[in-house]
């Protein structure tokens, strides 16, 4: 700012000096011009290096050069330098002229755009521009409409439907299936097929087999999907899911959606459920045979679907599993109004539940 003020002050002094010289006679100015040229000729002959030219002198020389033939009078710099000063001045001028950009639209139209966007959250800039054009005859670019639309806060949900909202709305119609393996105590390998509903996250069906095939998989899918109101089935691109299997599923009224290769996140709900089975059940027990593995999973599925406060089921106290051994606090049993903590231990020894019982005589 200090340098700009100094340049402006020097330019103002040059302008005043030019006005004073314009009041003099032409004969006096010609004599002074010849006098100065003779001195500059002596200065040029001695070869003294001139001082550095400041920005104010550059502007003054560039402006005065438009009033006469400056090529014969220029000594301190080369002609190419003065031309470069001219071009730099034009660039600064057009940069100043281009800063404002397009003129803003009227304030009434800006207020109308904000009102239309606020009262119609599902409308975008294209829709608002078309409404203004067809109903009011106002031609406004959609980009201009987007410029004046109100900005939504970061935490506020958008008016249009998000992808997560779309999936949530259609979750009850989506079923996902996948295989995972389990090893018994005798090192036999068993394949487990699981089907889960996206809406309630309930396990619809499971089964165990040592040799999976397309026919066996189709039969399991028919048993699980025959009485459900589902529209989509998600599975990966394993060779077990043959083309004939997908065609048979299509005849049941379901559309098969295959996940991309090597993309487990495309079937994330089913993959996460398989991880839950391993962490909460199979990592704590070693099945002896296929029937033992099936009984373990059957009891765990009952716990998962009815006694586990996960998404869409809500919190709640599960019922004691069948065949459980109950151990109650004897001290609390004889005290009215006290609560008794009852622990239920499964016959398999792998699942433990705890319940709180309230004395009805309280």
Image (spheres, rainbow, N blue to C red):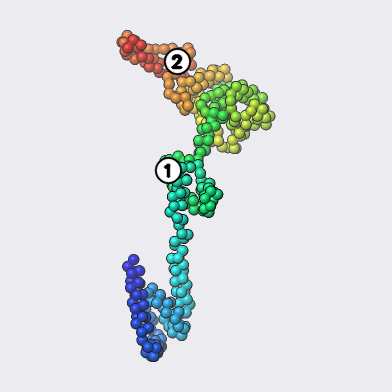
Of pointers 2 and 1, the one earlier in the residue sequence: 1
Q: Quadrant of residue 213?
A: top right
**Who's the residue at 45% across and 83% down the image?**
68
**Who's the residue at 47% across and 49% down the image?**
113
Q: Quadrant of residue 325?
A: top left
Q: Do we see residue 276 in this rendering? A: yes
Whether pointer 2 and pointer 1 mark residues with C-beta atoms closer than 8 Å, the reply is: no
Q: Nearer the viewer, residue 154 or 21?
A: 21
**Who's the residue at 50% across and 24% down the image?**
282
Gap in angstroms between the C-alphas marked 2 and 1: 46 Å
Which secondary structure, mark 1? Answer: loop
Q: Nearer the viewer, residue 100 or 177?
A: 100
Query: Disc 1 marks which residue?
Result: 154
User: Dot 1: few (<14), some (14–19), or many (≥20) neighbours within 10 Å?
Assistant: few
Give the residue furthest to the right: 244
Single out the mark in the foreground, 2 or 1.
1
Q: Is residue 129 left or right of residue 3?
A: right
Query: Disc 2 marks which residue?
Result: 320
Give the residue furthest to the top: 334
Against 79, residue 137 (above or below) is: above
Q: Do we see residue 289 in this rendering? A: no
């Amino acid at each position: 700012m200090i340098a700009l003020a100094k340049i402006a002050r020097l330019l103002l002094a040059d302008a005043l000096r030019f006005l004073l010289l314009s009041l003099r006679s032409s004969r006096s100015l010609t004599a002074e011009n010849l006098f100065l040229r003779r001195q500059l000729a002596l200065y040029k002959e001695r070869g003294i290096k001139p001082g550095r030219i400041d920005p104010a002198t550059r502007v003054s020389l560039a402006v005065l050069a438009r009033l006469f033939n400056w090529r014969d009078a220029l000594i301190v710099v080369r002609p190419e330098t003065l031309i470069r000063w001219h071009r730099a001045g034009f660039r600064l001028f057009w940069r100043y002229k281009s800063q404002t950009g397009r003129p803003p639209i009227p304030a009434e139209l800006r207020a109308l755009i904000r009102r239309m966007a606020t009262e119609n959250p599902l409308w975008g800039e294209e829709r608002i521009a078309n409404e203004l054009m067809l109903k009011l005859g106002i031609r406004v670019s959609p980009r201009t409409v987007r410029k004046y639309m109100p900005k939504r806060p970061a935490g506020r949900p958008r008016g249009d439907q998000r992808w997560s909202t779309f999936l949530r709305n259609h979750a009850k119609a989506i079923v996902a299936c996948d295989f995972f393996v389990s090893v018994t105590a005798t090192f036999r390998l068993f394949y487990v097929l699981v089907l889960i509903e996206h809406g309630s996250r309930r396990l619809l069906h499971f089964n165990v087999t040592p040799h999976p095939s397309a026919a066996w998989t189709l039969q399991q899918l028919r048993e699980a999907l025959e009485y459900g109101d589902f529209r989509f089935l998600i599975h990966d691109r394993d060779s077990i899911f043959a083309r004939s299997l997908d065609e048979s599923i299509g005849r049941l009224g379901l559309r098969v959606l295959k996940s991309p290769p090597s993309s487990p996140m495309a079937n994330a709900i089913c993959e996460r459920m398989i991880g839950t089975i391993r962490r909460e059940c199979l990592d704590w027990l070693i099945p002896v045979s296929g029937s033992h593995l099936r009984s373990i999973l059957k009891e765990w599925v009952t716990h998962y679907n009815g006694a586990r406060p996960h998404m869409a089921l809500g919190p709640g106290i599960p019922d004691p599993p069948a065949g459980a051994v109950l151990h109650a606090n004897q001290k609390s049993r004889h005290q009215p109004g006290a609560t008794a903590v009852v622990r239920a231990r499964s016959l398999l020894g792998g699942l433990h539940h705890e319940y709180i019982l309230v004395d009805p005589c309280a």
